[in-house]
Structures are given as C-alpha cells and as structure tokens.
Image (tube, coloured by chain):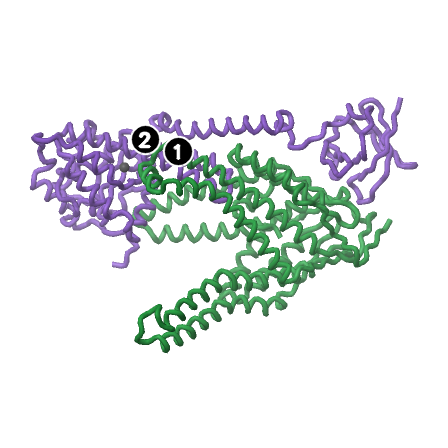
Amino acid sequence: MPMFFDAWHFDGQSAVRRNVEIEARGHQFYLREQDKQSGPFDFADLRFLENKADTKVYGLEGRDGWRLGLRGNVPSELVPMLPAAKTYGGLIDRLGLGKASLVFAGISAAVVAVVLFSPQWLAPLVPSSVEQKLGDALVGDFGGRFCDTPQGKAALAKLTRSLDDNPQDLQVEVANIDMLNAVALPGGKVLLFQGLLSQAKSPDEVAGVLAHEIGHVRERHVMQGLLRQMGLAVVLGGFDGSGGSTLNSMLSTTYTRDSEREADERSLQALKRANISPVGTADFFNRLAAMDGSGDIKDRQARTMASYSSSHPLSDERRKLFENAVVKGAAYKPALTPDEWRELKTMCAQDKDVKSGWGFDIE
Amino acid sequence: MTEHQGKAPSAVTFHGSWTDFAKIALPNVLLTLVTLGIYRFWATTRERQYLWSHTRFIDEQLEWTGRGIELFIGFVMVFFLLGLPLVIMQLVINGLVFQGQPLLAGIIIFAMIMFVFYLTGLAYFRALRYRLSRTYWRGIRGGSDDEGFTYGFSYIWKNVVAAIPLYLLYPWASMSLWNERWSKMSFGPYQFQSDADWKALMKRYLLFYLVPFLLFVGAIMIGVSAAASGAGGTPFSTAGGVAAAVMIIFGVLGIYILMPLAALLYYSKFMRVAIGALRIGDLEFDFTARSPDWILYWLGNLAIWMLAYGAAFAPFSIFIAADPTQFAQQLEAGESILSFGLVIGILVAIIPIAFASSIIRYRRWKFFVVHTEAFGEVNLDRMTQSTTQSASHGEGLLDAFDVGAI
Ligand SMILES: [Zn+2]
C-alpha cells in the first residue's frame, strides 16, 4: 500500500530543483516527478543534515549532493522511517547539553590528573639505558667544554662520593661556561658550571648545590618533568592561542617548585650525613637571589637550553631553609681540603684542551 | 531552465542574526572548555553550518557539509606528522649547539624554516580547496583537482622574489598567488578564473610602505626643533620637553593608528581588485566594501576585543586588588591552592575571549557576504556535479599555521 508525500529534491547530478512526491513502499521509497521516477532508495540510507527554516533536509548515503527537503510538519506516517534530527550530534544529543558537559568536564579533569600524577611512577619505569642515551643525545661531551685534570677530577669524585652512596651511576662534570648555575640532565648527568665554582667562597657551597642536583637525579625529577611537559603539551594542545600554554606553564611550574623543595630536602640530608655545614649553601642562595632578574643574554640562553632539565626559583625561603638547618656548635668538617678545593676551582684554567663559552661567541 | 539575475537585488545575501548565532556560539564555548579544547573542531563546524545556511546565492542557501571529525583528524595528523617532529628537531638543535656544532644547527634551522614556509603555502591552498569541496549549492559542490604541491613552491619563490627589492614587490606576490590559487579551484563543472592586476595596488602599497619613513622624518623634524628651542633649559619644563612629549604621542599614534590604518587601506583595495577579477562560468564578482566600511568593521572588532579582554581580566584584578602583597608572596611561594585558583581563573577567562572570537568570525563572514555581488547568469541544467576528489581530512595544516582561507 504506497503512501505519497510532497517534497523538494536535488539529485546531486545537476542544480535543477525538482518538486517530487515521495512514494513510500515498506522500508523503501521512490521519488516521482510528473512522468519521471527515481529509486528505489532505502529509508535506512537517509541522513539528517539540517533544519533549514521550516524544512528538514536529508542526504542519501553514497550519493554526493543528493538532497531531499520536507517542508512543514512531517506526516506522522513518515516520521518513524526518517532518521532523527540532530543538534549537536551523537553523544551530546543523547545526554543533553548539561549532562554531557558534566561528563566531559569529569573526563578532562581525570585526564589532566593522570598527566600530572602519573610521571611520578612512570619515570622510574623508563629504562636507565634509554635515559642514558637521551642524556648523551642532548649533551654529548658538551662540545669539549668539560674540564679535566687528574687532581680536579679526583676532588670532584671525592665530593660526589661524600654526598651519594652510589656515585658510579652519576656523571658529574664541570662545564667551562661562566654561568652561576648547575643542572641535572637525563641519565644521571649533573653539570656544574665554572661560573658557580669561580664565585663559590668554599667547597661547602658547591657541596650543597651538587647535593641538590643529585637529589633531582635520585628523585627522577628530570624524567618526570619531561614526561609531564610532553603529556600536558598533548592534553592541552587542543586549546588554540595562548590559553593552553598559559595553563601548561601554570601547572608545570607548581610541580617544578615541589621538585625543588624535594631536592633541597635531599641536599640537606646529604650534607648532614657528610657532616658538611649548610651555611655555604645558604650563602650561595643569598648571592643567587641578589642576581635574580639581572639575567644577561648569556644567562638567558643558558636558561632556555636547560629548560628541559630543572629551573631554580630563587627566593629567600631557600636561604632560610639552609640557614635554619645549621646546628649550633656542631663539629662540621670542610667538604674538601684546601688543596683539593684549589684543584677543583682551577681545573678549567689548568686544562689546556678545554673549549670555552658557547661556541657562537666572537672570541 | 535558465535563471537570470540582474544588478539588484544582490545575488549574494545574508539572513543571519547575531543573537541566533550566539545561541550556537555559547554552547560551543562551554563544550570547548570542558573538553580541553577538543570540541572546537565540532564548534567550527556548527558555526559554519549556521553561516552557510543563512547565506543565500540567488534563490537558494548555501550548505556546509564539513564535519568536526574531519577537522579533528587534520589537526591530529599535523600534530603527529609535523608538531612532534618539529619539537624533536628542536631538541636535536639544542643538542648540536650544546655539542659545539652551531653551523650544522644553523643549516638544520634554515631547512626547517623553508619546510614550514612551503607547508604554509600548501595550507592556504588546501584550506580553500577543503572549504569549496564542503560548500554545496543546490546539491552541487566545488573543489580542485590540484593537490597544491606546486602551489607550495610558488608560495616560496614568489615571496622570496617579493622580498629581494625590500618587499616592494609584495603586492605582485600576493596578487599572483591569489590568481594562481583561485585558477585551480572549481565549482560544479566550471573552473574559476582570476587575472587580477597587481599594479592597481601599488599606490596604496607605497602609502603603507612609506608611513614608517614619514613618521621617522616627522619625528626628526620635531626633534630638531625641540633641540633648537629647548637647548640649555631643563627638560620637560621648556618647549623641548613639550616637543619630546609630542614626539612620543606622535610615535604611539603612528604605530597604533596610522600603521594599521594604512594596512587597512591597502587590504581594502586588495580585496576589491582581487574579488573583482574573479569569474566562473558566466558569473562575475564584485566586492563593494570601500575603505570607510573596512575602518568601521575594524573599529567594531576592536571594541569587541576590548570588551572581551576587560571581562576576562576583571576577576583577576579583583583578586589582586584585594591584597596585592599577599598575592605576590603566595605566588612566589607557589602555594598550590592559589595555583588551583589561578588555573580556574584562566579557564573562566577563556570564556569571553572564545565567545568574542566567535562573534568576530560571524562579523567577518557577514562583512564579506554583504559586500560581495555577482553578475551574469547560471545555467542550472549545465551546472552539474563536481568531479573533483574531496580530501577526507580538513584544515589541519591551516589550523597549525593560523592563517585565513581567502
Ligand atoms: Zn633544582
């Protein structure tokens, strides 16, 4: 028993608009226009496209440009055969805008939480060989800028040994660069910059900074930071413009600060075990804080390059932390003997082969 | 069956209202926010569906058939095929500099810049092709048989040639690229043709080009007169001080008002010449927006942005005004509760800005549609379906480089 309905139609072959009658036969239909007829088409192949003023427009699966428009109220006999109208499409229409938003917000919060927290237990799962290779790829031999004299190296090794029980998985180097900084890199690499050594007044100072960087290595902060940064970049990559990157730096800075606190704790413990006074480290932070904000171009370059390692927020609190750790009347011993300290401090000056600066300095 | 179309009423008309559009834009902002930005591809699609379906050509509305998933796939492709390798290259370059090989690093950086340049050209082309292939009128769509790979090279060499005489040939490059791009597009069985003449742009371009020089000369003249009149006196209490202040005002005026104005004058002429030279089948186009229209349009956009940024930053200013020193201290100490508050603050600040950019897109579309005219006739029998291939992914590249389609 066929049923007839009025509609307009484009066949996708030409731009001519046709006024047609839909002849429904079970799950199929024909389109009739005076003496012409097309079909049969399956109702199941119809796709809802849009609401155009008072008209519902449908397309046909596999037919480019095929359109069928039903004006006004669709006859009730035809309604069950036609695909439902869509506003947002799929999931959101089914749940409703409010509920769908809540569901999405929940999922998003969970994803961000996973990206923020999972590096803590993911980082230790990264094989140390991979981390080693990554560190080598990033730094290599630092363009021949690592300083090396037998006495200086011996002093550095002694210092490292006194601060860590497993110095064999650490690679501590002095880089011949005039910069007041130190970094921990993937693969247990710790770089002390020559600027730090030249300005240091005692080996105790260097010990505190070195212990801090070793703390980063032992807490796997470097790998954690890398994973977190990459994760946030992926998750917040959907935002365009500066919104995503602002959120990214916001979230990761919070973690950087936590890491710094942990590394400072580690440093204090190591100094205590080695019976080295924290006063020197407090002095160091004091000097660093004074320099904060005055970063010259070299410094900024260095900071950009070390951006995937760790940044050190400079503040008074850290100085206080180390000052307060000083035990009155304790019998501290210096981290190195005067001879060893001199050898370490002058290692770069004594090393004739070492390159200096950044390589693009005009010197 | 032939439908004729005279000069008036306009063949291209817009029937939307921004309040109706806002009913689409606001849920879009909400959904984009809660999906960490992923929904924006579907948001774009819904926006375009509204804009296209409220644009009428002769007697029938346009139809946008692009889908959110296409744009999303395009974005993901660019993210993994381009974004990730670029990040890795960045690390490699850092490593090379660390290891003292700045020359090699320089060569790689140059190659990367050229590659990105090529892709930018490709992106312009692909975006236009994608948009035409998803635009239907009376069941017929547009497209292109060209993949755009040669256009990418044209984009490089024409821009390089334009830059050699101190960018004086920029109008030639942009116009010739416009012609090349559109000549490879089609709608239905008809190929677009474009032979716009760049020389018509030179007067406006030279005006834009000379504004900085004129400003510089003006500043020097004021400076000289200031030095002459203010010599020996204390600064800011004499004519010299006043002249210095005038000079600063002059500079600010130049950079923030005269430069954009000159650019707008040039762009206005460009669009008039470029669209005016566009033809397809028996149809010719015209773009009627003159400089005053552009200035009003631009001022309107400026006002919308200012309102949006005002709304975005208002909550923060209250935050800071309550207790600035405590705020600074807590920020320095990196208290996590506060960071959480800030994160929420930034998320909320995204709302007015995202809404404003949506309204700006509406204004842009409306501006173009209202000022576009078409003359000639369309033979509906001969207007048959396009045989062009249609790419299944959207404007990922375009998205990545943040460039416009036309
Ligand atoms: Zn640190």
Labelled disc at residue B181: none
For this rendering, which residue is in front, A289 or A342?
Answer: A289
Q: In which quarter of the image is residue A71?
A: top right
Mark 2 and mark 1 on one chain: yes
- Residue B333 at what x, y percent from top left? 31, 37
Left or right position of B252 against A199 = right
For this rendering, which residue is in front, A345 or A146?
Answer: A345
Chain letter for the green colouring in the rendering: B
Q: What residue type is labelled 1?
A: Arg
- Residue B285 at what x, y percent from top left? 72, 58
Q: Total number of numbered labels?
A: 2
Residue B80 visible:
no
Within-10-Å neighbours for mark 1: few <14, some 14–19, many 20+: many
Left or right position of B359 against A28 = left
Question: Mark 2 sits on what residue?
Answer: A129
- Residue B364 at what x, y percent from top left? 63, 51
Q: Residue sitting at 58 percent across and 67 percent down? A: B204
Chain letter for the purple colouring in the rendering: A
Question: Mark 1 sits on what residue?
Answer: A228
Distance CA(mark 2)–CA(mark 1)? 20 Å
Q: Name the chain under label 1.
A: A
Q: Is mark 2 on a helix, strand or loop?
A: helix
Please tell me which of labels 2 and 1 falls first in the chain: 2
Circle nearer the viewer, 2 or 1: 1
Left or right position of B52 against A76 = left
For this rendering, which residue is in front, B21 or A346?
Answer: B21
Within-10-Å neighbours for mark 2: few <14, some 14–19, many 20+: few
In the picture shown, does residue B365 fall above or below B262?
above
Q: Which amino acid does label 2 sit on?
A: Ser
